[in-house]
Every structure is written in C-alpha cells, then in structure tokens.
Image: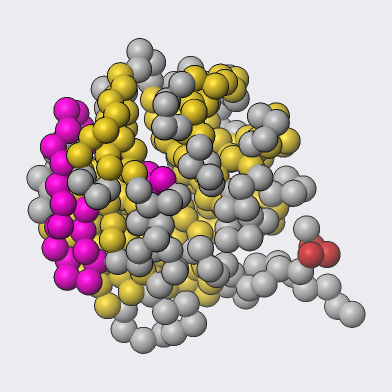
Amino acid sequence: MEETIPFKNLHSREYQGHKKKVHSVAWNCTGTKLASGSVDQTARVWLIEPHGHGKIKDIELKGHTDSVDQLCWDPKHTDLIATASGDKTVRLWDARSGKCSQQAELSGENINITYRPDGTHVAVGNRDDELTILDVRKFKPIHRRKFNYEVNEIAWNMTGEMFLLTTGNGTVEVLAYPSLRPLDTVVAHTAGCYCIAIDPKGRYFAVGSADSLVSLWDISEMLCVRTFTKLEWPVRTISFNHTGDYIASASEDLFVDISNVHTGRSLHQIPCKAAMNSVEWNPKYNLLAYAGMIRPNIRLMKVFFEYLALRIPKLYQSLG
C-alpha cells in the first residue's frame, strides 16, 4: 500500500473584509461560524461551510472605539461572542443580529479575553496587568486582581477549576478557581511567555514564548513533555486541533507550523506573506483559520488584510 503524504492536497480560501490588521480569529462551539477582530475597531462573523464553495455570508459587529484585540465565543451558545477592546470596554454580541447585548466598562485597555468552559464567566486581561472576571449573566465584575508583573494570555483548564496566566517572567502562574489562590509557578521558558492553549482532551497545555519555542506540559503533573522548535521568532499564537493530535503555531516567520503533539515532529508549514497574529483550529474539523497582514499591492497603493481558512485532509496514524 502506498504511503499517504500528509498535507499533500491543501485547499485554502481567502476572505477580505477588515480595513486594518486582524488581531484575532475564533470559531464558535459548533465550528460553523468564524469571528475576526481588527485594529479597524470592528469584529466580523463569517458563516463557514467546511465543505462548501458558495458565497460566504458575513456580519459586522460595530461599536467599539478602539482596536478589537481579542474575541471568544460562548462555549455553550453558537451565537454569543465576547470582544475585548482598547476602548476599555468588553462587549457581548448576538452574532445573528450583529447587536451588542451587554457592555462592561473596565479600568484599562483590554487585550486578552477567554470564557470559562461552562460559559458562566469571562476573564479579561488589560495592558496594566489587571485581571477582571465577569459574571456573564449580569455582565458585572466579580473579581479584580492587579499583578506586579507582565501578564499575557490567560486560560482556564477544561474543568474550570484551574486558571493559568502566561507572564513576561517566562512563567505560567497557576491559580485555583474561583478563589484565585496561587497553586504553582511553572518556570516554562527563558524569555517571556506570550500565548497559551489548552488541549481539548484536557491532557496538556502548550505555551508559546519570546524564545521562539513552544513547550507542551502535562497538566496533571505540571511537567514539560516536549518542545517544538520550528519557529525562529517570538511565538505569537498557538492552537490544538479538535482531537488534540496536532498543534499549529505562528510568529513573524513567514509560515504557520503544524506539528504532531505526540512526537514533536513538524508535519507541514503553510507559507504566509507576512507575520501571523492568530491561529485557531475548528472545534469539529481539521480546518485551520489564521490571521495577519499581507504586504501592500504597489499598483493599488492599498493594504488588504486577510484571514484564511485551510482544509487539511485526514492524517493516518502511521504518519505520526
């Protein structure tokens, strides 16, 4: 039997809608809608058909007065999305109507946001290294904590009992939830930790660092299992696929790397025309969205910003 070559037949589609750089992409819980947040002060929601080739429908979420730096979907609702902006607000939107249903005024410029897996709480981080937890039902802060070190991306574990913060000190701070009591300090990298992703099976978390490495950690033992070394620039964004077998990572390198989680082997690099800011796998399919800036077309003298969805064929276990 002839061995199948992974990533041999790739299909990509390009969607243009934002007027400035895209900072964040995220799929809803059923993998049918893709949202993007941009420096142009808007978010967009795109209805994606994984196996379709028809016209893509999109809706604009308009109301922020500064950059939409990160967004995330309600893990229990297919049409509710939360956005974090430099205008100091966090907003909850209905993706069907494009209307803002809830808004909270916070103390600083918001840059990170994530939902608790049960959909009850939203955590927001700002440029002043302050963490705010919002109760989604009332959309009011229930916890605020200021840290005396740089706090970057944040995440809950799959049970919602543990809260993880990546820091500029090269550590991951592990807190109990909801008490926010310190449990552990994981010395993960020799430079600042920028991004974090949780394995959908709950076994691992991965950390991307300014040292250009991605580290994989056993979440029950807090031990480093392996590192991924393909990138040469600070790692901006990482994501596990829906089975937890593959991890995508991106930086200022002109490609997105896809590696096997279990072996550490790099399986494929997707060429890019510029640095990528956000990658995220679909929660149901091997469909990868990634966002960044493309270089200006000299003839038109206009810069277009894009994000792309890439369908990846099934990989056989023998290849991993």
Q: Locate the N terminus by quadrant.
A: bottom right
Q: Position of residue 180 (x, y in %)?
A: 42, 25
Task: Using residue 189 as the reference point, say whether residue 133 is left or right of it.
Answer: left
Q: Residue at image x 17%, y 66%? A: 98
Query: Most extreme residue toward the top, as rendered?
Result: 148
Query: How are the residues colored?
Result: secondary structure
Q: Position of residue 85 (x, y in %)?
A: 21, 42
Task: Using residue 193 as the reference point, say whether residue 27 is left or right of it.
Answer: left
Q: Position of residue 67 (x, y in %)?
A: 20, 44
Quarter of image, res 270: bottom right
- Give the answer, above or below, for where 274 lies relative to 183: below
| Residue 273 at least partly seen | no
In the image, the segment drawn in magenta is 92-116
- Give the answer, above or below, for where 40 lies relative to 311: above
Q: Is residue 111 magenta?
A: yes
Q: Is residue 145 magenta?
A: no
Majority secondary structure of magenta residues: strand
Foreground residue, 163 or 298? 163
Q: Locate the C terminus by quadrant.
A: bottom right
Quarter of image, res 228: top right
Q: Residue at image x 14%, y 63%? A: 99
Foreground residue, 225 or 212? 225
Q: Residue at image x 42%, y 26%? A: 179
Task: Using residue 270 as the reference point, say whether residue 148 is left or right of it.
Answer: left
Q: Residue at image x 65%, y 67%? A: 7
